Image (cartoon, grey):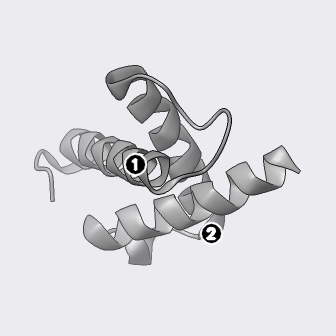
Protein backbone atom coordinates (compact mmCIF):
# COMPACT_ATOMS: atom_id res chain seq x y z
CA UNK A 1 0.00 0.00 0.00
CA UNK A 2 2.90 2.34 0.70
CA UNK A 3 4.22 2.22 -2.87
CA UNK A 4 0.79 3.16 -4.23
CA UNK A 5 0.71 6.19 -1.93
CA UNK A 6 4.19 7.19 -3.12
CA UNK A 7 3.08 6.93 -6.75
CA UNK A 8 -0.12 8.92 -6.24
CA UNK A 9 1.50 11.65 -4.14
CA UNK A 10 4.49 11.73 -6.49
CA UNK A 11 2.20 12.12 -9.47
CA UNK A 12 0.23 14.94 -7.87
CA UNK A 13 3.36 16.76 -6.67
CA UNK A 14 5.04 16.35 -10.06
CA UNK A 15 1.93 17.57 -11.87
CA UNK A 16 1.55 20.63 -9.63
CA UNK A 17 5.26 21.41 -9.95
CA UNK A 18 5.03 21.16 -13.74
CA UNK A 19 2.08 23.58 -13.69
CA UNK A 20 4.04 26.01 -11.51
CA UNK A 21 7.14 25.79 -13.73
CA UNK A 22 5.05 25.80 -16.96
CA UNK A 23 6.44 22.50 -18.25
CA UNK A 24 3.16 20.57 -18.12
CA UNK A 25 2.81 20.33 -21.90
CA UNK A 26 6.25 18.68 -22.17
CA UNK A 27 5.66 15.98 -19.55
CA UNK A 28 3.43 12.97 -19.36
CA UNK A 29 2.04 11.24 -16.31
CA UNK A 30 5.06 8.95 -15.92
CA UNK A 31 7.49 11.85 -15.90
CA UNK A 32 5.25 13.71 -13.43
CA UNK A 33 5.44 10.74 -11.06
CA UNK A 34 9.22 10.54 -11.41
CA UNK A 35 9.60 14.29 -10.84
CA UNK A 36 7.38 14.10 -7.75
CA UNK A 37 9.23 11.17 -6.19
CA UNK A 38 12.71 12.54 -6.97
CA UNK A 39 11.55 15.96 -5.77
CA UNK A 40 10.43 14.42 -2.47
CA UNK A 41 13.85 12.79 -2.14
CA UNK A 42 15.63 16.10 -2.86
CA UNK A 43 13.40 17.91 -0.36
CA UNK A 44 14.20 15.24 2.23
CA UNK A 45 17.90 15.82 1.70
CA UNK A 46 17.65 19.61 1.81
CA UNK A 47 15.09 20.09 4.57
CA UNK A 48 15.58 16.85 6.50
CA UNK A 49 12.95 14.24 7.14
CA UNK A 50 10.82 12.89 4.34
CA UNK A 51 7.67 10.93 3.63
CA UNK A 52 8.53 7.77 5.48
CA UNK A 53 5.72 7.57 8.02
CA UNK A 54 2.71 9.60 6.94
CA UNK A 55 1.59 12.05 4.31
CA UNK A 56 0.74 15.37 5.94
CA UNK A 57 0.27 18.86 4.56
CA UNK A 58 3.83 19.72 5.60
CA UNK A 59 5.41 16.72 3.89
CA UNK A 60 3.26 17.27 0.80
CA UNK A 61 4.34 20.93 0.52
CA UNK A 62 7.95 19.96 1.16
CA UNK A 63 7.75 17.40 -1.65
CA UNK A 64 6.18 19.99 -3.92
CA UNK A 65 9.01 22.44 -3.20
CA UNK A 66 11.54 19.69 -3.95
CA UNK A 67 9.84 18.92 -7.27
CA UNK A 68 9.85 22.63 -8.21
CA UNK A 69 13.57 22.80 -7.33
CA UNK A 70 14.20 19.74 -9.51
CA UNK A 71 12.34 21.25 -12.48
CA UNK A 72 14.18 24.57 -12.01
CA UNK A 73 17.52 22.77 -12.14
CA UNK A 74 16.47 20.81 -15.24
CA UNK A 75 15.27 24.01 -16.95
CA UNK A 76 18.49 25.79 -16.02
CA UNK A 77 20.56 23.03 -17.60
CA UNK A 78 18.39 22.66 -20.72
CA UNK A 79 17.57 26.29 -21.52
CA UNK A 80 20.00 28.36 -19.51
CA UNK A 81 17.16 29.97 -17.54
CA UNK A 82 14.94 28.82 -14.71
CA UNK A 83 11.69 29.31 -16.68
Element class at badge 2? helix
Q: Give percent across and percent down for residue 57.
A: 46, 57
Q: Residues within 10 Å of mark 2 (few under 14, many from 20)?
A: few
Which residue is found at the position 59% from the left and 55% from the top? 10
Extreme residue toward the right, this view: 1
- Per the image, the residue denoted by label 1 is 67
- Per the image, the residue denoted by label 2 is 29
**Foreground mark, 2 or 1?**
1
Which residue is found at the position 40% from the left and 74% from the top? 24
Specify the quadrant of the image occupied by residue 16.
Answer: bottom left
Residue 3 visible within the image: yes
Disc with the residue nearer the chain's start (2 vs 1):
2
Which is nearer the eye, 64 or 79? Answer: 64
Q: Is residue 49 left or right of residue 61?
A: right
Element class at badge 1? helix
Specify the quadrant of the image occupied by residue 45.
Answer: top left
Q: Given contact means CB atoms under 8 Å apart, are the residues at marks 2 and 1 in contact?
A: no
Residue 81 got which mark? none
Amino acid sequence: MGIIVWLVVGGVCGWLASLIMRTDAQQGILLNIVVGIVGAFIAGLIFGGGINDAITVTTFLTSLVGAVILLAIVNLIRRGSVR
